Amino acid sequence: MDALCWNHPAISLKGSKNSENHGFLKSKSSSHFHCRAAMNSSNSESKPSPLKIQNRMFILGMGFVGQFFAQELKYSGWAVSGTCRNPGQKMQLEGRGFDVYVFDANDPEQGTLKAMKYHTHLLVSIPPDVDVGDPLLQHEKLLRTTLQGGDLRWLCYLSSTSVYGDYGGAWVNEDNPTNPSSQSGKLRIEAEERWLNLGNDLGLSSQVFRLGGIYGPGRSAIDTIIKQRSLSERQQHRARRQYTSRVHVQDICQALKACIQRPSSRRVYNIVDDDPAPREEVFSYARDLVERKWPGKFDSLSKQVEASVITNGSERGDKRVCNVRMKRELGASLVYPSYKSGLQSIIDQMKEEEPF
């Protein structure tokens, strides 16, 4: 099992010659710069009607991942629309060139659902609610009726590797049984199946991405240290695990773009890097990076954070998540195959005076 599921960096295939060209630029190690630079761009130029652009993405839930991916697509010439929770977020996102709808999944507006219908691709990035399950699928009949006969051809639901539950540190792949211990994990499993069924019924290419722990600029062990945050209850719970599989937000974008060019039918993919590691190891590495860049500035806090992480660090066995299917079937390559390269990139982009 270990030999078959080892996330070896050598397992990385290039895209198929028969893959569709969706306007994506060839990946480079600097592609993260494009993503971040685009996030700071203004919307001063006039933009064509989204319906006149060949590739149109609708993102249900423009949070951390959704916004990064939206910027990647916009950089490649896509029209991007999506949803957010309040007018303030809507104004901020529209200022960056997106068509945005304030959306209450408990009371969806027909106009928003119709807008989804005339996009070519749909990314679902809304987590389940403990009371109602998947917020949008509680209106599945309305959703199904509205989307029929539209332009959609591709759907991806963003799930979590938490669905596997506890494997005592063993490797797991997409064929392993799911056994989540949390209610949210159980709701994720249900949502996965229902979104795949909906996509299948609508004749779409449908897939599920099970994401590892997500990190990136503004959301990393480095940011926790320099912003003097204490670990949340959820983070402390993760710290007790033997292993944590994680993924840089830029590599989620890489995998999504690869999947668009190699669409599948009812496939599930683990989206993680090559290097599952204990959380205390990651924080220790982050602390060393911070101390080298700003000697003595964060010493007391970094030790406090590290001590919090190490406490009861090995009480709960976990799993190491395999990414071989992602590489072999999608041809996806990782910009940051390890938390070390990911954290190094994050701190390299910070100016000397930034934390102060």
Image: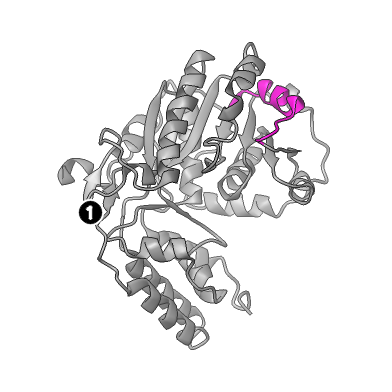
**Label 1 SS:** loop
**Residue 262 in view (yes/no):** no
In terms of image quadrants, where is residue 83?
Answer: top right
Q: Is 335 in the magenta?
A: no
Q: Amino acid at mark 1?
A: Gly
**Residue under the point 47% across and 69% down:** 231
Q: Indicate left or right for 146 with 293 as reference.
A: right
Query: Which class describes the residues within 10 Å of circle 1: few (<14), some (14-19), or many (20+)?
Result: some
Q: Residue furthest front?
A: 131
**Residue under the point 38% across and 35% down:** 269
**Residue 176 in view (yes/no):** yes
Q: Position of residue 98 (x, y in %)?
A: 73, 40
**Residue under the point 32% across and 64% down:** 240
Give the residues in magenta: 105-121
40 shown above or below 5: below
Q: Position of residue 183 (x, y in %)?
A: 42, 45
In the picture, the quarter occupied by the N terminus is: top left
